[in-house]
Amino acid sequence: MEQSGTNANASRKILVVDDEPLTACMLQFILESQGYQTRCLHDASEVLTTAQQWSPDLILLDVVLPGENGFDLCRRLKTHNYVKSIPVLFISGLDDATAVVQGFDAGGVDYIAKPFCNEEVLARVGTHLKISALHESLEIQKNAERVVRNLFEAQAATIFAMAKLAEYRDESTGHHLERVRELCRLLALELAKDSAYTNHVTDDFVTCIHHAAPLHDIGKIAIPDSILQKRGALTSEEYQTIQTHTTIGAETLQSVFNEYPDNLFIGMGIEIALYHHERWDGNGYPDGLVGRCIPLSARIMAVADVYDALRSDRCYRKGMSHRETVAMLLENAGNHFDPEIVKVAMRVESQFAALFP
């Protein structure tokens, strides 16, 4: 049920400052007839203290006051953090253009000339209260967005730190996480240019994959060092053990996602952790998914992860050149990799190469 104008105004407070008692009483009567709360002062001496203690929503301020004129008083109010956002409407018998300009220069939001019309006073007061409320609402929204952004960044930093713990246990990977997240971002940005992916690869998708990519091997934190850092070939049992990093990583992230179900990059991180070793031809693990049954984020990661792995030096081999790695990606398009993702990789291959100076 919508409130009447009088009821809606009951919470709004207006400070009236005028050295003429009759004018001040008239303004109070006009405002209180519409439900506004009012207080009245007749000089400048107590305006700042009253504004600080009573917190009015608006100040109606006469220009000609004993001791200090309204323009100087307004400037003084605007230097105090707690009251500087309160809108000031000048109301004065000085109605020439110079006085109006002085009022705006002093920080006022409007200027009402005496003798005033009751309806004009109410209309201008109502308008500026609405504008002030919109400013407050916008500021609250900005603060809320800032808090959400800070929380998101804190979560992202925490999750990235967890992923780094897993990476540190695999001494040969270097700055793998930083490069892989950038490779995924480059692929997603380029893929978004294709009409077939425009609706899927949105700005949110690009942001999510950039944050989620480092989570792909987070499950390796549960793999024994004897396997993870083994220099020779893995036995079949060891290979089966290392494959479990996909399910372990996904299960770990799922427990986080259960607590924060609105966190999109954790949701994508689960997909990537679980499925980045699937193959286009169905010969990957853990589930042997085929083609487009593999989530797009994981298909992008598969290309980025293998490119980075082949370019990087290992204790048992030297990293491949960019040209050799590109040839390998092309050779395996359609069996190991999504051929569309490989095509996209070819369009940004120079940017790939730049990550390995």
Image (cartoon, helix red, strand yellow):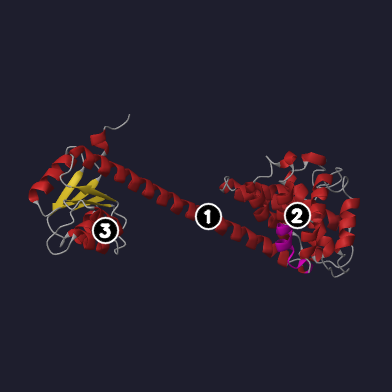
Residue in the image at 84% along x and 45% along y: 339
Q: Position of residue 95 (x, y in %)?
A: 20, 51
Question: Label 2 is placed on what type of residue?
Answer: His
Q: How many marks?
A: 3
Which region is colored magenta? 172-183
CA separation in Å, label 3 and label 2: 71 Å
Along the polypeptide, which appears first: circle 1 or circle 3?
3
Please identify, in this view, whether the residue under mark 3 or under mark 2 is nearer the observer: 3
Who is closer to the viewer here, 324 or 237? 324
From the image, tell me which residue sits under label 2: 245
Mark 3, residue position: 102
- The quarter of the picture where the C terminus appears is bottom right
- Residue sitting farthest toward the left: 22
**Residue extending farthest top:** 1
Q: What residue type is labelled 3?
A: Gln
Residue at 19% in and 57% down: 50
The residue labelled by disc 1 is 149
